[in-house]
């Protein structure tokens, strides 16, 4: 069932197998909600998706049936919540609750106040606000990043690509927290 009212922005209905490798959702439905958040429903049973791209859905509407398609080890529903930047976030607080309202700020991940956090080159961190040092909105590609440079309130975050550190962004340290 659709978690909340929204518009279908993606789906697949013709995947008729279970993969042993990879990261395929198999058959899926992706909905963008009125507040800009997304929900994703994966591993849906072959040929049971009831919606298509552009369809308007309402909370509780049946959109498909639980299945075992894609990279899956048994029938289940893969449920994701993504923020307005289409970045996966912890869905736990939304399983039984509504998504945040448009004018209501999303809950911030728990973090220490900036003055208490001490960062060092080599620390693993995650962004808590996806804005680079120049104010540009970013898309998060990795689960965490490594601080490769520190200068005042600025941290350069890099990701490991085939054994080499590649710069992802330069951010204000108030926009990052230590990865746990």
Image (tube, helix red, strand yellow):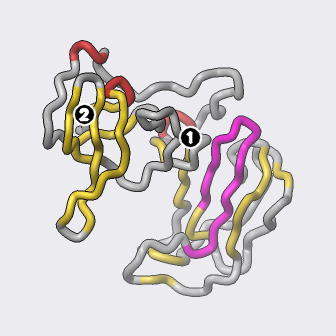
Q: Nearer the viewer, residue 77 or 141?
A: 141
| Bounds of the magenta segment | 26-41
Could you say which quadrant of the image residue 120 lies in? top left
Q: Is residue 111 magenta?
A: no
Q: Residue at x 41, y 29 (%)?
A: 109
Query: x and y percent of residue 42 in the render?
Result: 57, 65
Is 50 above or below relative to 158? below
Q: Which mark is residue 178?
A: 2
Helix, strand or loop for the magenta stretch, by majority? strand
Circle 2 — which element? strand
Q: Is residue 93 left or right of residue 21?
A: right
User: Of tags 2 and 1, which is closer to the observer?
Assistant: 2
Q: Residue at x 14, y 43 (%)?
A: 122
- Quarter holding the C terminus is top left
Q: Is residue 106 left or right of residue 73?
A: right
Q: Nearer the viewer, residue 127 or 25?
A: 127
Q: Residue at x 55, y 61 (%)?
A: 77
Q: Which mark is residue 4?
A: none
Q: Earlier in the sequence, mark 2 or mark 1?
A: 1
Spatial separation of the CA atoms under disc 2 and disc 1: 26 Å
Is 171 above or below relative to 161? above
For the residue carrying disc 1, how many other residues have a C-alpha within 10 Å: few (<14), some (14-19), or many (20+)?
few
Circle 1 — which element? loop
Q: Nearer the viewer, residue 108 or 64?
A: 108
Q: Is residue 31 magenta?
A: yes
Which residue is labeled 1 in the image? 95
């Amino acid at each position: 069932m659709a978690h909340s009212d929204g518009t279908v922005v993606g789906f697949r209905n013709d995947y008729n197998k279970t993969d042993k490798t990879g990261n395929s959702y198999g058959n899926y439905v992706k909905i963008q909600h009125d507040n800009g958040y997304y929900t994703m429903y994966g591993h849906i049973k072959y040929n049971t998706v009831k919606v298509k791209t552009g369809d308007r859905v309402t909370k509780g509407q049946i959109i498909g049936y639980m299945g075992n398609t894609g990279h899956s080890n048994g029938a289940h529903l893969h449920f994701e919540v993504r923020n307005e930047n289409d970045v996966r976030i912890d869905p736990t607080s939304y399983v039984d609750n509504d998504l945040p309202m448009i004018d209501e700020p999303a809950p911030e991940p728990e973090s220490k106040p900036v003055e208490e956090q001490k960062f060092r080159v080599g620390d693993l961190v995650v962004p808590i606000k996806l804005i680079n040092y120049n104010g540009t909105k970013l898309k998060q590609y990795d689960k965490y990043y490594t601080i490769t440079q520190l200068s005042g309130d600025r941290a350069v975050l890099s990701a490991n690509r085939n054994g080499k550190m590649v710069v992802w962004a330069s951010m204000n340290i108030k926009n990052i927290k230590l990865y746990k």
